[in-house]
Amino acid sequence: MFSIFFSLNTYCQSERKNYNNDAKREKLIKNPLTPSKAAFYSAVIPGLGQIYTKRYWTIPFIYGGLTVSAYYFIYQTNEMNSYRNAYKQRIRGDFSDEYTRKILFNDQLIEGMNFHKNYRDLSILWFVGIYLLNVLDANVGAHLLQFNVESKLTIKPYLDQSGINSFPTAGINLNLKF
């Protein structure tokens, strides 16, 4: 019974079509609009341009940077509001805020508020900078897809013994083959 089961050929599924990834990559390389499409896609949704050019490894860095800068924006905003609310309470004559025993003077509350406001503004700049780097990375990555890399140009480090004093010397060798 066991041998009959394995000797029968079953054709219940059709053959899988072979999708050639190299043909898709060649299409991306030959299309002159690939860099602008990748930059547009990354501008719409961060990381989408990297998905379009199949550079998936950069996506965690993009979302990590955006997430960290958004977290610090929220944190610094909450701290700034805390100092500002304590200052407003003290101006009204109510000294029962959370900084009563820590901070004695109102000028120190204003200084703390300005400190957190500056770092909040820096986190906004970091967020915008990472977003713009995302778009730039997608554009440059798509341009580099179209860059012809051949084995005719090589740069190799080498370590050589000097004939005069037998000390090792290090260098870089640049080879260009025609």
Image: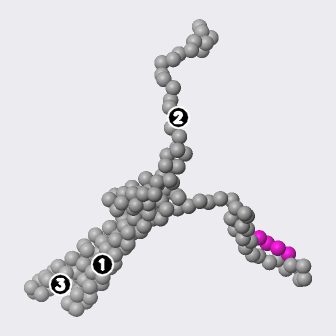
For numbered disc 1, what is the local secondary structure?
A: helix
Q: CA distance from mark 1 to mark 3?
A: 21 Å
Task: Pick whichever of labels 1 and 3 is earlier in the sequence.
Answer: 3
Q: Which residue is mark 2?
A: 18
Q: Which residue is mark 1?
A: 121
Q: Which badge, 2 or 3, is on the more N-terminal residue?
A: 2
- Callout 2: SS: loop
- Nearer the observer, 38 or 66: 38
Type of amino acid at the residue the image marks with label 2: Asn
Residue 89 lies within the magenta run: no
Residue 50 in view: no
Which residue is the site of mark 3? 87
Amino acid bearing label 3: Tyr
Nearest-to-viewer mark from 2 and 1: 2
Type of amino acid at the residue the image marks with label 1: Asp
What's the magenta region? 157-161
Q: What residue occupies the far top of the structure in this picture?
A: 1
Quarter of the image that includes the C terminus? bottom right
